[in-house]
Each structure stands twice: as structure tokens, then as C-alpha cells.
Amino acid sequence: MLSTLLAISWEPEIRGIVVVLISVVVLIGGSYLLVGSNVGARLGVLIILAGFFGWMAIMGAVWWTYGIGLKGPEPSWKPAEPVTIIRDAQLLTSAGVLDGVAPNAATPVATAAAASDQLQAEGWSLLDEADPQRGQAVAASDAILQIEAEEFAAGDYLSVRVFDRGGERYPKINDSLDFVAFFHKARYALVEVVPVVPQRTEPGRAPARPVADETQPHRYVYMVRDLGAKRQPAILITFGSGIIFAILCWLLHRRDLALRENLASDKTPVKA
């Protein structure tokens, strides 16, 4: 018994389950005992269930509106198809990122600069370093390069440019009235990275500042935006609880009609 109590006290999962069960039994069970003792057991069940699912529908609507409570997957960057890591700027055309002729110059740095100009000419936006969207794209590309593809280790490269394209919502009445824009175009990000020159580390000294290796071709991480389903659980709770609440209210209403009809009729049994 003591070990069980200690497990409940120290394990957050077990403690959370026990707290929820006690809350359900005390709140719902206590309300049912109070209502059932006044109107009867069967009618008390209908009233308690109707109140519960009505409260769930209201709570789900609040979660849906503000994006809180029970959430689905958050928006994130995912590897794009068919190629995610492009190992040279000259391969951007064959990968489907560029529509024109593949950029080509004498040095890798000049080729990357030509590719940057061509990307912006074809509609890609170069994100500023202070833009928070740039930081999100760089973080996602780091996960792809270091964990998924194992292309680089941490500190072996620099993210020099981030390009963004797409993501427009439609249909729009004008720029200020977009509450009916339920559809959107695919949004893509292109993170340009360059390997750094290997630096010698010395004990007791701060690491040297990374320097881009100008002899290496620039790599590109091609990603697509996944909008996720942040409000999906709240939407399902709202509509599901609302439907059940409506059915329970209809059952209560039908019972009231049957009770009125029975009380108004002359079929009251008489003692012999």
C-alpha cells in the first residue's frame, strides 16, 4: 500500500490519471446524485449528460477560437520532394527550384551569387536576418542536415541565405477582408548553407570564428511548409459534443411532450 501511494505521489502520469478519475467521479457523480435524487435516476442521467456535453461543446468552441487546450500538430517545415538537399547551385534547375538556365560562374561563390539573383528574379523572397521566419527555416534545415540526412555535424557549416516563396491565401475580397480565404498555395523555403574551413581548437581558448570555405560549392535545403492541424481536435470536440447535446435535448423535449400528453388525457386509472 505504501509503495502504491509513493508511486502516485512521484509518478506524474499516474498522479494525473488518478486526479482526473477523482475529479470525474466527484464532480459528475456528485451532480448526478443531487439531480437524480430530485427528478429520478433515468431523467437525472439525461440531464447530467446534456449538461456535460453542452459544456464540452462550449469549451471546444473556446479552444477552437483561441488555439489553446487540446492541440494537434503545430505548423512545421518538412523535406520537399523530389530532392531535399541540393549539393550545388548548378543543380537547382534540374531539381525544379529554378525554371531558367542553371547558374554557372568561375567560382562557387560567384555561382551562388548568380543563383541568388536568379531566384529573386523568379519570385523567391530573400528573408532578412532579423525575420523570425528565417530562424524557423534555419532550425528546420539544421535538423534535416544533422539528424535526418547526417550531411554535416553541428558547427561544420554556415547558413548564409534563406529564400521563401508561395503560401498565398485565397479567395480574398481585398487585402483587409480575408476571413473567407480558406485555401492556400504551397509555401516553400530554400536555405543556402556553405561548409566552413576546419579550425584548430586549443584547450582553454574560445573557439575561433567560423569562416566559410570559398572552394566548396554551396548546398541548398529545399523544404515545404506543413500547416499542421493545430485546431483539429478542438473542432472535432465542438461538433461531436454539439451533436450529442442536441440529441439529448431532443430526448428531453420528447419526454416532456409525452408527459404533457399523459397528464392532459382522461385515461387516469380509477380504483375499482
Image (cartoon, grey):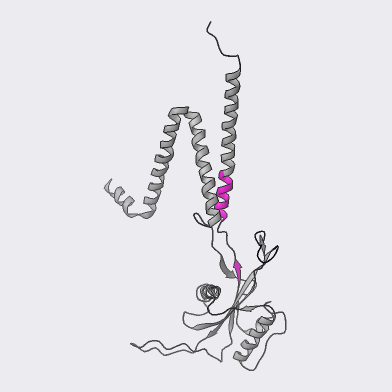
Residue at image point 49% right, 36% down: 48
Q: Nearer the viewer, residue 160 or 63?
A: 63
Whether residue 228 is in magenta: the answer is yes
Nearer to us in this view, 128 or 148: 128
Would you place residue 16 above or below residue 214 in this image?
above
Vertical placement of 217 versus 172: above or below?
below
How many numbered circles does the render carry?
A: 0
Would residue 40 be seen by someone viewing this image from the given angle? no
* 233, 212: nearer the viewer: 233
Looking at the picture, how far across and down is residue 130, in whole percent? Answer: 52, 78
> Split into 4 quadrants, where in the image is the N terminus?
top left
Q: Which residues are magenta?
A: 223-241
Q: Is residue 55 above or below residue 89?
A: above
Q: Determine the residue positioned at 56% across, 89% down.
A: 216
Q: Is residue 251 above or below residue 19?
A: above
Residue 111, position as x, y percentages in the image: 63, 89
Q: Is residue 239 visible?
A: yes
**Residue 87 forms part of the magenta stretch:** no
Residue furthest left as drawn: 2
The residue at the far right in this view is 100
Q: Residue furthest bottom?
A: 106
> Residue visible at 41% across and 40% down?
27
Q: Position of residue 196 (x, y in %)?
A: 50, 87
